[in-house]
Amino acid sequence: MAKDLLQRYIWLVDTIRRHGRMSRGQIDQLWMRTSYSGGNPMPRRTFYNYRQAVEELFNIEIKCDSATFDYYISDIGDRHNEGVTNWLLNTAVTNELLAGSRAVADKIFLEQVPSAREFLAPVIESLRDNRPIRFDYHAYGRVLPSEGVVVEPYFLKIFRQRWYVTGRHTASGKVKTYALDRITRLIVLPETFEPDPEFDAEEYFSSSFGIVFTHGEVKRIALKVESRQARYFRDLPLHHSQEEVVHDGYSIFYYRMRISPDLVSEILSYGSKVRVLEPRELKAMVRQELAKALENYNNA
């Protein structure tokens, strides 16, 4: 696909999304201000083709209200699919904005994160076609990589700007998760597999924080958070089960989650601004990690 075409699709979706509902005349007025138009309105056939391409690429349907002839973005209906679609669109918009901002490239600083670009496309292909993947995997803490790992992929997840694939490890029959940036020599195998109809990808991590799945019991978790830090928690909830009770100078946030190493690390990252109230086992785990950290400095 020509880069210029992609930019035009993104412009159309982003324009209608920002304005809510627009007539063809209103769309043309804004279109003629862009460098794509040459100062001319968008031809009817071109508008139709762009709508079709947007639906195919982003799963976004641009509908027409037959009563007012206004165009609007159709409700996707599925919250998960809507989140994926918004992520794809926002990523595309950001990429196009950055690509057009070379003059200020020295003033834009991006976080360096592990790259998954090499294998993201083939993993998505394997998910689409229900085909296993085979790869070598070098887990942290292991001297040598595991070679020839075969997995039937179930879903992809991004956490802390790293991509992970979760699926059935064929040798053990267990569901496991792998970081794409720790994978080498990945190939998509020619055979197909039947996904487990009992496996619910949405449910798998619904009671977990992070990427590490644990089989422990779902616990009621209470965190006491200083009022200033609580604003951050409101804007970026730790988990979809989050509930807040506001007090003078602090808030208590309640969750229904399984305890995991990722959750302990997250709590520790807030230092003295966050305190575990319950359950006792989570409080003990955080206290133990703090004691280990303090011991490192006592022995220095």
Image (tube, rainbow, N blue to C red):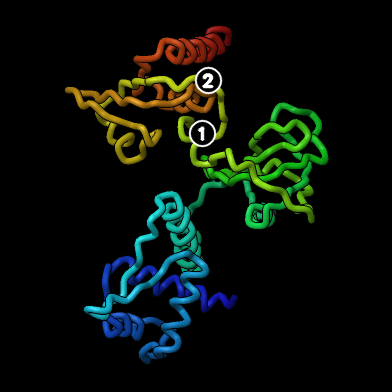
Tag 2's secondary structure? loop
Residue 210 got which mark? 1
Task: Decide: few, some or many residues near mark 2? Use Cα within 10 Å; few <14, some 14-19, many ≥20.
Answer: few
Q: Which of 127/89 is in front?
A: 127
Residue 199 location (% of width, % of height): 58, 39
Q: Is residue 229 above or below residue 292?
A: below
Q: Is residue 274 left or right of residue 111?
A: left
Q: Is residue 259 left or right of residue 175?
A: left
Residue 176 location (% of width, % of height): 66, 34
The answer to the question of whether label 2 and label 1 lie on touching residues, with beta carbons closer than 8 A, is: no
The quadrant the N terminus occupies is bottom right
Tag 1's secondary structure? loop
Residue 228 got which mark? none
The residue under the point 38% across, 56% down is 77
The residue under the point 45% across, 86% down is 46
Q: Is residue 52 left or right of residue 174?
A: left
Q: Is residue 126 above or below residue 113?
A: below
The quadrant the C terminus occupies is top right
The residue under the point 34% across, 71% down is 15
Q: Is residue 140 left or right of residue 189?
A: left
Question: Which residue position is annotated with label 2?
Answer: 216
Q: Which of 279/199 is in front?
A: 199
Q: Which of 147/297 is in front?
A: 147
